[in-house]
Image (tube, helix red, strand yellow):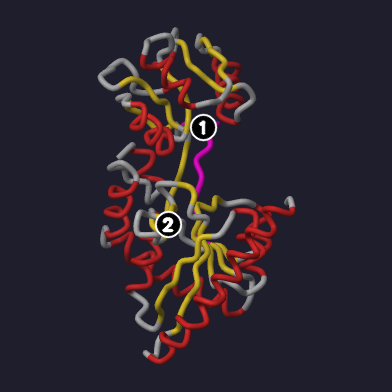
Amino acid sequence: MNRKKITAAFVLLLAGAVVFAGAKKEKEAAGLTLLRIGTEGAMPPYNFVNEKGEADGYDVATVKAIVELLPEYSAEFVPIAWEGIFVALEGGEFDLLASFLAWRKEREEKYYLSKIPYMWYSYSVVFKKGRNDIRSIKDLEGKKVAAGVGAAYTVQLEEYIKRTGAKIEIVYTDGNIANALTELDNGRVDATISSVVTTQITADKLGYQIDSLPLTEDGWTVGPIHLLFPKTEKGRLLRDQFDVALEQIIANGKLREISRKYLFGKDYTTKEALEAGA
């Protein structure tokens, strides 16, 4: 981490501490325990700062829905640079993190992860809207697929071709999704592989119409996204409370509504929903 980033993170934490002091007194006067939630605030549509200057996005809306079911708590969301987010949690600045955090072995060893994921992710095959000849990865047979050199999804595609003998021509790119979408739109390639949610944002900016299907077959990455809590007794108890409430908003459909609101009409709240391409 360079000095400029360290300074920026420290200034943000210091400013947040001042706000926290006043907000904490106000909430405690109302008999509520204030939870401070760290989020990067720079990864739309999962987390970002909206035009009102407030933390917003799927991660934030999910935690707000959970806290609504835990009346003893109120929530304050603090955007912070990615470089300082884990240090802040470990230092007691935050009670939890909600920032599109995928499962990692090292994270599970160091922190408490929500036992229940609040989202599932995978790579997707992205193609021009209106095509009806791509409905599974097998339909890429004989087609050209744009893929960034050395990208994780490219390696998985190369392994798929080697494993199955599929006749798929990889058109290697620089990894810039805007360039891949341009090739897709002008017909020089049939498809590309990417994270469909972030790709959709780029497509909308460029005015391209796309469609997609999730890659959930064996050998393709399908993973859970978790809330993260400090590995303390308080963190464990809070994790358990959040898990109960999270289970409720999955069961009653509230989380599905949030997913469809922020994630372009798609339901990524369970592995089953992801695999169904809902």
Q: Which dot marks residue 256?
A: none
Residue 107 left/right relative to 225: right
Q: Is residue 222 magenta?
A: yes
Q: Is residue 172 above or below residue 70?
A: above
- Which element type, helix, strand or loop, lies under badge 2? helix
Task: Reply yes or no: does residue 76 show up in magenta.
Answer: no
**Residue depicted at 46% across the width and 43% down the height:** 121
Taking 83 as reference, is 221 left or right? left
**Looking at the picture, does residue 256 appear above or below residue 31?**
above
> Which residue: 46% across, 88% down?
25
Instruction: Tell me the element at label 1.
Output: loop
Q: Position of residue 110 (x, y in %)?
A: 68, 63
Instruction: Report the residue at 37% width, 46% height from top.
Output: 268
The residue singled out by tag 1 in the image is 218
Q: Which residue is mark 2?
A: 59
Which amino acid type is marked by label 2?
Asp
Q: Position of residue 53 (x, y in %)?
A: 40, 59
Structural crowding at the residue carrying mark 1, measured as other residues with C-alpha within 10 Å and reported as few (<14), some (14–19) or many (≥20)? few
Q: Quadrant of the C terminus?
A: top left
Specify the amino acid type for callout 1: Asp
How far from the left and from the top, in percent, is residue 161? 56, 17
Residue 96: x and y, percent? 53, 68
Residue 274 versus residue 193 in the image, above or below: below
Return the disc, 2 or 1, that comes first in the chain's sequence: 2
Relative horizontal placement of residue 254, taking residue 7 as reference (left or right): left
Which residue is drawn at the image coordinates 46% and 35% (left, top)? 195
| Residues rendered magenta in the picture | 217-227
Question: Which quadrant of the figure has residue 13?
Answer: bottom right
Callout in the foreground (2, 1): 2
Instruction: Please state if 105 lies on the left or on the right of 65 as rendered.
Output: right
Q: Residues within 10 Å of mark 2 (few under 14, many from 20)?
A: many
